[in-house]
Image (tube, helix red, strand yellow):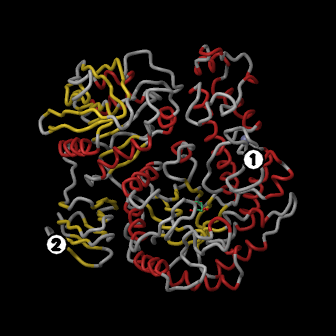
Amino acid sequence: MKKVLFGGDYNPEQWPEEVWSEDMNLFGEAHIETLTVGVFSWSIIQKDENTYDFSVLDKIMEFLQANNKNVCLATGTAAHPPWMANKYPEVTRVDFEGRKRKFGQRHNSCPNSPVYQKYSKLLAEKIATRYHHYNNIIAWHVNNEYGGTCYCENCEKAFRSWLQKKYGTLEKLNDAWNTTFWSHYFYDWEEIVVPNALSEHYNKENVTAFQGITLDYMRFNSDSMLANFIAEKEIVKDITPGIPVTTNFMGMYRPLDYFKWAKHLDFISWDNYPPDMHSEARMALTHSLMRGLKKGQPFWLMEQTPSTTACRDINPVKRPGVMRLWSYQALAHGADAILFFQMRKSKGASEKYHGAVIDHSGRNDTRVFKEITGLGEELLLLENEVIGAVTKAKVALVFDWDCWWAVEISDGPSRYISYQQTMIHYYQALYKLNVDIDVIGLDQSLEDYEIVIAPLLHMMKDNYYQKLEEFVEKGGIFVTTYLSGIVDEYDNAILDVSPGLLKNLLGIRIDETDTLHPADHNLICLDHGKLQGSYTCNLIFDLVQTENAEIIATYGKDFYAGLPVITKNHYGAGEAWYIGSQPEAALLEVLFSQLTEQKGIASDIEADQGLEIVRRHKEDKVFTFILNHSDETKNIVLPNHCFCVLEQNYYEKGEQITLPAKEVRILRETKYI
Ligand code: GLA
Ligand code: ZN
């Protein structure tokens, strides 16, 4: 594929056929060629247990083929039809409170219901068999945004089998869950029940009496939905082996371990709905995480709204230029497809006010349609340019779902510690320096990196500490924080001083950890070379003692004033840094700026603060994306002669570019120039 794919979710079954031709004309105008169809079509395809009627989907498929459109074809299994819930109540879920759900909403099926499994596979099979001869199907879209949790009896049974497979014997399970605590020793698999508000939890999903049980249920729930995905994937792959398969992820979505899922997808796709208008760093982090799921491979932006969402309490429209800017941000971080939800605005139900490429009126002169058309035209300029280009980052942020779960379901030391917010906090400081950053899982090699940052590396799985030791030994810089290295994969404490398995690498010892209300602050007093000054910190305060490490900063207040809070340990040819409290952003910026300079990987572009600068590489070409998310004009000075792909003009080395608010440049350099 040479063109950036452009289009999105298309649900023509929701409006009269006369409108379809109008849609095609408008798509033509906007250079839209890729349409995702059939995502929520199950109930119009299957009206009862035995009756399938494909007439509507047939028409849509024929129509799209006749109009030379690419199809991303859904298996349609993300919302079961009413008859199924009525006849087989087992297909609906039981929620965290233990309430049996009735028919309603979507993403509503129990992943362990044999009835759901049977009919979802059958639907995928029938769709694949019926349309396999269409040569315009470019991808399979299995289900939609897998998510949520179920606590029904089928899940309970399946959980016991999952545990039997994992532990083999009850003895091992009892040991892993530490069941001698609070009289929990299990003598029969049947004694094990699902952990929810009726059992181990104190009414909140994060508050459990047994972390080991809850953690395994989180893993099990993610695996259950993954098994649904794999079952459908295998069916469509059998019938159409050449068509790549994906399902749309939701970015930093806690319930599903996407690193585990990613291995089973042919390519990654995800839906970008940031919580507000000022989340550019968070979006950049999420794009990088989604790219990191399959390193070296481009991903699809499967959904974003052209203007507004509908499900939030307040749903602001994207300001002029923002839809274009965020689309280019996705490209900058590795996307090769820019798709929207949705093509035409729904007539009724909960998404009738959700933004769409085409409004209820079908007009081509709305601001949104005009901006989409502008972007569609512009993307033609990118043909044969960035497609397939990769990110070559020297800095990696380590992200792990088990650590996320374990940190947040922990009783103590503080419920205010958020894995996601911490990741954003660290990423944001790096992002401001305009260095490329990979977000990687524990499986990934560290060979490509100079700096590896792993905040809240709580759970030490698969001897990951050895990989880190090797990385630092060879000259790498490693940075970690409080609550790292101290539990094993079952969430049991490492029986040693904190930071447990990282103690040798970090050269420190922590005997006590204080936590305070987020509003209460201490001070971090830096006094080490260029790192000087005092900064605030809050939430958590490790009382660090150095063994081999050097003291970089000490606390400024409380009974531990003067004790180390930031340390650096020389280990082999590298350095291992420890940050024992949550510092204000400015401290991280100063620290990372020094570390990137030290490694010779600081950005070579002289730019005003507030621009995002990201690179993709392809053969001898480097594409530099410059994005102005701010509301002000910004300037940059170019280090090299380059060609702007969007403006189609050349810039000389040393020339200044003035970039208006919300503007973008994509600069192509050829390495030998
Ligand atoms: C999700 C879904 C879509 C649609 C959008 C609305 O991402 O996948 O079907 O509901 O949200 O924002
Ligand atoms: Zn269930």
Q: Determine crowd level at label 2: few under 14, some 14-19, many 20+ residues with C-alpha closer than 10 A.
A: few
Kindly tell me whether residue 447 is visible in this rendering.
Answer: yes
Above or below, 275 against 453 in this view is below
Position of 191 relative to 313 (above/below): above
Which of the four quarters of the rendered structure image does ligand 1 lie in?
bottom right
Identify the residue at image location x=64%, y=58%. Answer: 241
Residue 11, given in percent of the width and then of the height, sits at: 66, 71
* Front residue of 236 and 187: 187
Frontmost residue, 453 versus 381? 453
The mark lying in front, picked from 2 and 1, is: 1
Q: Is residue 411 above or below residue 281?
A: above
Residue at the spot x=61%, y=68% of the render? 36
Residue matched to label 1: 101
Q: Do the residues labelled 2 and 1 touch (CB within 8 Å)?
A: no
| In the image, farthest residue toward the left | 529
The residue under label 1 is which amino acid type? Arg
Residue density around tag 1, few if under 14, some if 14–19, many if 20 or more, within 10 Å: some
Mark 2 or mark 1, earlier in chain: 1
* Residue 15 drawn above or below residue 137: below
Residue under the point 63% across and 46% down? 148
What residue does disc 2 label? 652
